[in-house]
Structures are given as C-alpha cells and as structure tokens.
Image (tube, grey):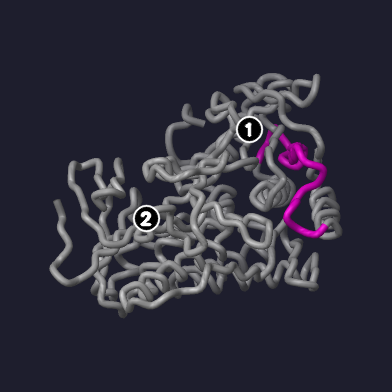
Amino acid sequence: MNAPQAGIPHVVVIGGGFAGLWATRALARDGVRITLIDRRNHHLFQPLLYQVATAGLSSPDIAAPLRHILRGQRNVEVRLGEVTGIDASTRTVALADGDTLAYDFLLLASGATHAYFGHDDWAPHAPGLKTLDDALAVRRRLLLAFERAEAADTAQERAAWLNFAIVGGGPTGVELAGTLAEIARHTLRDEFRNIDPAEAKVCLIEAGPRVLASFPEALSARARAQLERLGVEVVTGTPVGAIDANGYRLGDTFVPARTVLWAAGVAASPLGKLLGAPCDRAGRVLVEADLSIPGHPEVFVAGDLASVQQDGKPVPGVAPAAKQMGAYVARVIRARLRKQSCPPFRYRDFGNLATIGRMAAVMHLGRLQLSGLLAWWFWLFIHIFFLIGFRNRLIVLINWAWAYWSYQRHARIILGDEDAA
C-alpha cells in the first residue's frame, strides 16, 4: 500500500480530463501531496476531437502528455493505471496492478462513455467519439468509405459506401455532419477516377424536434439552414430504429449506409458505481452542494460523472463546467485544510458555441446570439485559446489557416487494419 506521508494530506485524483487537471493545478501551492491517476498518459481537448476524426488535425494537436503539463508542479505524481476499486470506508483506491493507494481526499473525475439506450449491439456499427482511439477509428472508417466506393463493382454498392449518417443532433453531430459534407464537396475534389465524392450523401438524424436543442430555437433553425446549404440532409423527430453493418432503419425504411457515426448519447463512467453513492438514470453520481458524496465529505465527484442541479436544471456536461467543478473542489479541499467553510458550487454559464463548417457557426452568450462568419471566428479563437501548450495553439492556427484557404485537410492518412473499419 502507498501510504500518505506523515503530516501531509494526500489527494488522489482519478481522471486527467478537464475536472481532474484543473483541480490538480489549482492545488499547486497548497500543502498537499497529489496522485493523479489516468488510464491514458495524456490530457485530451475533447471539443476538437471531431477535427481529428475528420482529418483536420493530428492527435498531438489536441492532446498533451500529463507528465509534461505537470512537470513543474512538484507536489504531483502522475500514475498511469486503471482503478478497479474504491473503498470509501477505508479511504483506499485499488489499481489493476495490485497496488493500493490511501487518501485523505479523493476526486473522481473519470468522465463519460457512449450510451446506446439499451442497444449496445449497435456499437460496432456506429462508433462514437470520446477518445483519440475513437477518433482515429472514425477517421479510418470515413476515408476507407471513399476508397471502397472507388473500387465498388455496382452502383448500389457504391451508393451504400457514399451514404453517411450521423445519429445525434447535438454539437458533436452537427460538427461532424458539416465537416464531412465539406470534405466530400471540396477536400476530395478531383482525387478519384471512378466516383465523384461530391455525390456523397450526409444525413444528420435527431430524435428530438430540432438540432442543437441546448441553443435558443432561432439559432437552432439557423444551424439547420447552414447545414442544409452545405448539402446535409437533416432529419428530426424520428429516432433510429436499428443499425447494422449494412445501414440503418428510420421508421419503416431501411437505408443502405456503410458508415454510421454515433453522437446521440453518453453514459457516466462505470467507476461512479464503485462509490456506493446514489446515481441518476445515466449513471452520474448525485452529489451534495459542495460536490462531495453523501456521508463522505472527503470524496468528491466532478465533470461528466457528477449529477448537479442548479436553478432546477442540470449543469451541462461541457468542458467549462468540468473546469469550474475541478477548480471548486480544490477550493473546498483548501478550505477544509484551513478548517474553513466554502459556499456551494455555482456554475457560471459563459454560453454555447458550435461550428457547422467553414465560416459557419452559431454562438449563444447571454442575450447575444450570433451565426455565420462572426460566430465562426469567435469559435476558432476560443478553441485555440483554451488548448494546452503554445505549440498546440500555433500548429492548430497554421493548420486551420491552410485549411481555410485551400479546403485541404493535412491528416488524411489511413492508419490501422482496414478490416477493422
């Protein structure tokens, strides 16, 4: 067992995402020892994950090694490992390698995974986007679809390979659909001999009444109009009934499509259930006002794994909320060490952004609602600003500038086994 050093409180942070990393950095000057545990060695800027999936950016452009990010913070040890058990009664965390860590404070911020609403058999045929591995697998599927359409023997086979469907009309689905339409109509122009990539059909399917449901209705309508101008078919009010290797079903109609992507739902990390605390239907942990779990004020949950209600509405599972939760948990720990109290967590909503394509985006910031070019520029600079590391910001800016003028996407390399697509 890895026991805390005498007199120095030990903070264990599970998850190197936005909540975990922001909490860790906020405790840099406090008299605590921190162990940050993650299954992967990097912090990922998830809002740009779809750019890796659509070949606009490379993996290192939106990710950075946790050890590098925290290299100057001497009170942190980064641990690459998988958590297999949490015992709140003994204040210990068990790892897959057999080691056990004792803690004085615990922050669980392990994020979320895909949710297929009881249809887990759809997962192999409709991958989602949560990790870099997911993004590279999606990129392989997208690029191979055009290659296989080029080699198809029949018109029906060619059409099935050129039919693309994205299930889910939230920001990820909208961004994927718009970018994929641009790739087909501009990026791949003149590169094939037997097919015209512009004939690809991109369908965005949303079970609810409109896309971008978290945005005001007027912006949602503008987003739909911008998608349709790009050539995306937008289907709302109709849930997908089935998905298999050959296509998907809408109502009574089966649509042949060899590439279906999932952006419709998320479920909380299964680690939340290890705490023994009450959870909501999505598996998120129901936390107290200070983000601790009932009966254990030393155990906190933050980010996508936390179910937090504010003013009668759930706090959204977005990056700004996770950052604020992580920083707040650090304040609570600091206050506890000083035997002080801390006010309840309050989420500050700085607005919503979603990009639809080149020079097309929507933005909602309080009473301010923007769409089109100005919203796109705002979206671009906000995302560059929040990237970790100067190199990443510079490289992404250069890549986007090149893509803006040329429509080219530099990361169109197919990796992995073709049979896995």
State which region is magenta.
192-216
Q: Is residue 406 above or below residue 382?
A: above
Find numbered disc 2 in the image and state the secondary structure of the residue it sits on. Answer: strand
Q: Nearer the viewer, residue 146 or 3?
A: 3
Please name the amino acid that badge 2 sits on: His
- Label 1 vs 2, first from the N-terminus: 1
Q: Nearer the viewer, residue 240 or 367?
A: 367
Residue 395 has which mark?
Answer: none
Residue at x 28%, y 76% (from the top left corner) = 72
Please name the amino acid that badge 1 sits on: Thr
**Residue 107 placement, left or right of 256:** left
The residue to which callout 2 is attached is 296
Number of residues whose C-alpha sits closer than 10 Å to that of mark 2, classed few (under 14), some (14–19) or many (20 or more): some
> x and y percent of residue 83 in the render?
30, 45
**Residue 182 placement, left or right of 31:** right
> x and y percent of residue 181 in the render?
72, 47
Q: Is residue 210 above or below residue 316?
A: above
> x and y percent of residue 178 in the render?
72, 50
The residue to which callout 1 is attached is 259
Find numbered disc 1 in the image and state the secondary structure of the residue it sits on. Answer: strand
**Residue 304 placement, left or right of 350:** left
- Residue 13 magenta: no
Res. 192 in view: yes
Marks 1 and 2 sit apart, C-alpha to C-alpha, by 46 Å
> x and y percent of residue 396 in the render?
54, 66
Residue at x 35%, y 54% (from the top left corner) = 14
- Residue 210 magenta: yes
